[in-house]
């Protein structure tokens, strides 16, 4: 029995490999000098070379996608020079007009929505003439817009002559410009930049704080202030105000 056990069990002090080769090295394995560990030549070296390269490629791809996403989010919805949607606007002779395409050298485009039979709109004639003379000399386009199709061109001409209104005249029979300018009443002003951005819409001034109330002199001239800020290359400090006047028919 003792002899059999000695044949099976390694002698004390002998390594397992010496006792019977229980642990063998792979023929392709070697011990790296000075490290005391076995490695397969080529495999570890390949991993050390490819892992950093793969990580760099993935990081570069992620940065590229993130940059593209940010650029897409920051892109303006209306680009300078991009064609604007065709608006169904006509002059008093029935000819089609696109006031945005004709404003190539303008610093701003003003639309004042007027009503033929609106007393508040017609009472603003002197103030509108003053603003027209002041700002058209500074490359501001000025348009009077009559919404709807209820009144003929002849009726509009008669009202313009009667109150001595100043500015180029448009008709907006389908209310396309009314919706673009977010107008609700007459008189109401809207100011666009030539790239199509709406930067102000609302009252001309606060002469009529509410229906039935009139100040002899306005305390704030909103349209004038907005135009002065635009011409000074400043953002419009109050881009929207509530206009008081006659409701534009045909809006929801």
Image (cartoon, rainbow, N blue to C red):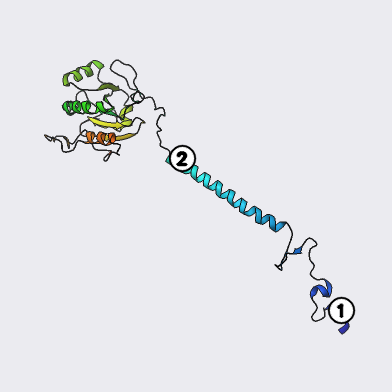
Image quarter (top left, top right, bottom left or bottom right) of the N terminus: bottom right
Q: Position of residue 154 (x, y in %)?
A: 23, 15
Q: Which residue is mark 1?
A: 7
Identify the secondary structure beneath mark 2. helix
Q: Position of residue 35 (x, y in %)?
A: 70, 67
Q: Looking at the image, can residue 186 be seen?
A: no
Q: Vertically, is 53 above or below 124?
A: below
- Other residues around mark 1 within 10 Å, as few (<14) / some (14–19) / many (≥20): few
Q: Position of residue 204 (x, y in %)?
A: 21, 33
Residue, far left: 216
Residue at (52, 47) in percent of width and height = 63
Quarter of the image for residue 182 reads: top left
Taking depth in this image into account, of 128 and 29 the one nearest to the observer is 29
Quarter of the image for residue 12 reads: bottom right
Mark drawn on residue 20:
none
Quarter of the image for residue 172 reads: top left
Image quarter (top left, top right, bottom left or bottom right) of the C terminus: top left
Residue at (83, 75) in percent of width and height = 19
Q: Position of residue 81 (x, y in %)?
A: 41, 29
Q: Mark 1 or mark 2, which is nearer to you?
A: 2
Q: Looking at the image, can residue 154 be seen?
A: yes
Q: Which residue is mark 2?
A: 72
C-alpha gap between disc 1 and disc 2: 79 Å
Identify the secondary structure beneath mark 1. helix
Which numbered disc flags the more N-terminal residue, 1 or 2? 1
Residue at (50, 46) in percent of width and height = 66
Q: Are marks 1 and 2 in contact (CB under 8 Å)?
A: no
- Other residues around mark 2 within 10 Å, as few (<14) / some (14–19) / many (≥20): few
Q: How many marks?
A: 2
Q: Vertically, is 167 above or below 74?
A: above
Residue, far front: 34
């Amino acid at each position: 029995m003792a002899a059999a056990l000695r044949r099976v069990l390694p002698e004390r002090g002998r390594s397992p490999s010496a006792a019977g080769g229980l642990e063998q090295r792979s023929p392709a394995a070697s011990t790296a000098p000075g490290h005391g560990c076995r490695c397969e030549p080529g495999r570890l070296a390949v991993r050390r070379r490819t892992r950093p390269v793969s990580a760099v490629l993935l990081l570069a791809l992620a940065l590229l996608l993130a940059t593209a996403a940010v650029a897409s989010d920051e892109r303006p919805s209306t680009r300078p020079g991009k064609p604007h949607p065709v608006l169904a606007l006509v002059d008093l002779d029935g000819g089609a007009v696109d006031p945005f395409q004709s404003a190539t050298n303008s610093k701003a485009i003003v639309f004042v929505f007027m009503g033929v039979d609106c007393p508040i709109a017609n009472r603003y004639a002197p103030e509108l003439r003053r603003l027209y003379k002041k700002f058209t000399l500074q490359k501001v386009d000025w348009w009077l817009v009559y919404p709807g199709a209820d009144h003929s061109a002849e009726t509009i001409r008669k009202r313009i002559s009667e109150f001595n209104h100043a500015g180029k005249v448009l008709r907006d029979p389908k209310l396309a410009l009314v919706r673009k300018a977010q107008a609700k009443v007459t008189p109401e002003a809207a100011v666009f930049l030539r790239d199509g951005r709406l930067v102000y819409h609302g009252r001309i001034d606060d002469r009529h704080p509410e229906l039935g109330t009139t100040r002899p002199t306005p305390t704030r001239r909103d349209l004038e202030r907005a135009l002065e800020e635009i011409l000074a290359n400043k953002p419009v400090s109050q881009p929207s105000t509530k206009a008081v006047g006659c409701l534009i028919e045909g809006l929801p």
